[in-house]
């Protein structure tokens, strides 16, 4: 039995039992509670859910993408990762360059109308091919704005003649030289630019902490899609802690996950109930190639999930 996963399942049950019925930007509708917290002890195992299969490859390529400072989806597509497609696609279909059938509200409409869904998938395939093969198109429509990667690695200066800030390099340097610091902060919210992104950052701020030779981190996530996004966010930050710990000679401590609007979309309720009825398995482990000498040099093959046993995947539509 895993205390780590139990916390996730208990919180899912609590949202179903006590959640406010709340409308949301996507028009889907949610059950939501505000201000939740889970704490994952990473020495107990790697907190990838086992009550449904979670595709670790997608988490790995997304984190490598953030660490590259990349905010263009081409890298994700090259790794067969489609979790950000909709938000880049939206910019194209709303632009003057788009010449296909009307795609207004494609997220909701493709759930309700199978004929439309077919057309939508055709346009999205066309979009993906253009991003992969056409450099000009990729430059115009592949970016998802001033979020995550861009802000982590190259925060633009507001000072005249100032330089960009690489928060990740600074963070690692501070953890090595000043581990007692209470200023080990990584932020992904620039109030000037982030609100204009197609999807403003959800994991907004994290703080790192070193004690007894162990590295912990706490994330503040402003908005959490409990069934689809949150399992990815838990695994992504836990992996980041493992990678930074490996680069700074520390063991792993806790991942503390604090979420503001913690919601289950109405069209995920059956899936959550199915998940809650399933047994848990033993948590997997993470292997990182010890030869890698910089956090920026990890490749997909340098990070491996070991002994992952899970129940089958559960499909659910993503709210756009
Ligand atoms: N509504 C919503 N929820 C999110 O979790 C979310 C967004 N939007 N927008 C941006 C990113 C993208 N993220 C996503 C998007 C989709 C999946 C998803 O559909 N996961 C499936 C597997 C998908 C696949 O195999 O391609 C899953 O079963 O986990 C997960 C995270 C997290 N974020
Ligand atoms: O890493 C992520 C990114 C996004 N989400 C979810 C949370 C919400 O359901 C949507 C974002 O919609 P907003 O209206 O901007 O809050 O995406 C997530 O859980 N994790």
Image: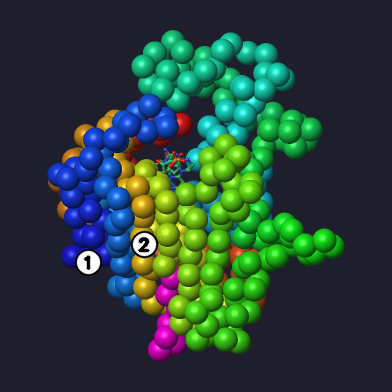
Residue at 53%, 40% in the rendered image: 199
Q: Quadrant of the N terminus?
A: bottom left
Is 239 one of the magenta-colored residues? Answer: no
Relative to 54, say whether 106 is above or below. Answer: above
Q: Could you tell me residue 118's position as x and y percent?
A: 48, 16
Q: Nearer the viewer, residue 25 or 76?
A: 25
Kindly check if marks 1 and 2 are in contact, taking CB atoms under 8 A apart as contact. no
Relative to 50, say whether 162 is above or below. Answer: below
Neighbourhood count class around disc 2 (C-alpha, 10 Å): few under 14, some 14–19, many 20 upward: many
Q: Start and end of the magenta stretch? A: 211-217
Q: Nearer the viewer, residue 217 or 136?
A: 217
Instruction: Give the residue at mark 1.
Output: 3
Q: Quadrant of residue 22?
A: top left
Alpha carbon separation for disc pair 1 and 2: 14 Å
Neighbourhood count class around disc 1 (C-alpha, 10 Å): few under 14, some 14–19, many 20 upward: few
- Look at the image and name its color scheme: rainbow
1 or 2: mark nearer the eye: 2
Q: Could you tell me residue 276's position as x and y percent?
A: 18, 47
């Amino acid at each position: 039995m895993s205390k780590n996963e139990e916390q996730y399942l208990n919180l899912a049950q609590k949202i179903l039992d006590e959640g406010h019925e709340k409308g949301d930007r996507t028009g889907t509708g949610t059950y939501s509670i505000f201000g939740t917290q889970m704490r994952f002890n990473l020495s107990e195992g790697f907190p990838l859910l086992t009550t449904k299969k979670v595709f670790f490859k997608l988490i790995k390529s997304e984190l490598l993408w953030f660490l590259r400072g990349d905010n263009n989806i081409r890298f994700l597509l090259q790794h067969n990762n489609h979790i950000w497609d909709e938000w880049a696609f939206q910019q194209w279909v709303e632009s003057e360059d788009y010449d296909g059938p009307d795609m207004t509200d494609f997220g909701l409409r493709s759930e309700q109308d199978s004929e439309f869904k077919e057309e939508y998938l055709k346009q999205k395939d066309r979009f993906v091919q253009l991003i992969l093969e056409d450099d000009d198109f990729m430059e115009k429509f592949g970016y998802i704005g001033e979020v995550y990667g861009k802000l982590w690695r190259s925060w633009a200066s507001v000072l005249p003649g100032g330089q960009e800030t690489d928060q990740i390099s600074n963070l690692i340097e501070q953890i090595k030289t000043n581990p007692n610091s209470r200023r080990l902060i990584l932020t992904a919210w620039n109030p000037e630019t982030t609100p204009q992104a197609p999807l403003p950052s959800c994991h907004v701020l994290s703080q790192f902490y070193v004690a007894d030779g162990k590295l912990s981190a706490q994330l503040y996530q402003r908005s959490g899609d409990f069934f689809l996004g949150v399992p990815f966010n838990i695994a992504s930050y836990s992996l980041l802690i493992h990678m930074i710990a490996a680069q700074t000679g520390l063991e792993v401590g806790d991942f503390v996950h604090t979420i503001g609007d913690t919601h289950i979309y109405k069209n995920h309720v059956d899936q959550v109930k199915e998940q809650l009825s399933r047994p848990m398995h033993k948590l997997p482990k993470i292997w990182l190639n010890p030869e890698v000498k910089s956090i920026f040099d990890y490749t997909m093959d340098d990070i491996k999930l070991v002994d992952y046993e899970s129940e089958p995947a559960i499909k659910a539509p993503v709210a756009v």
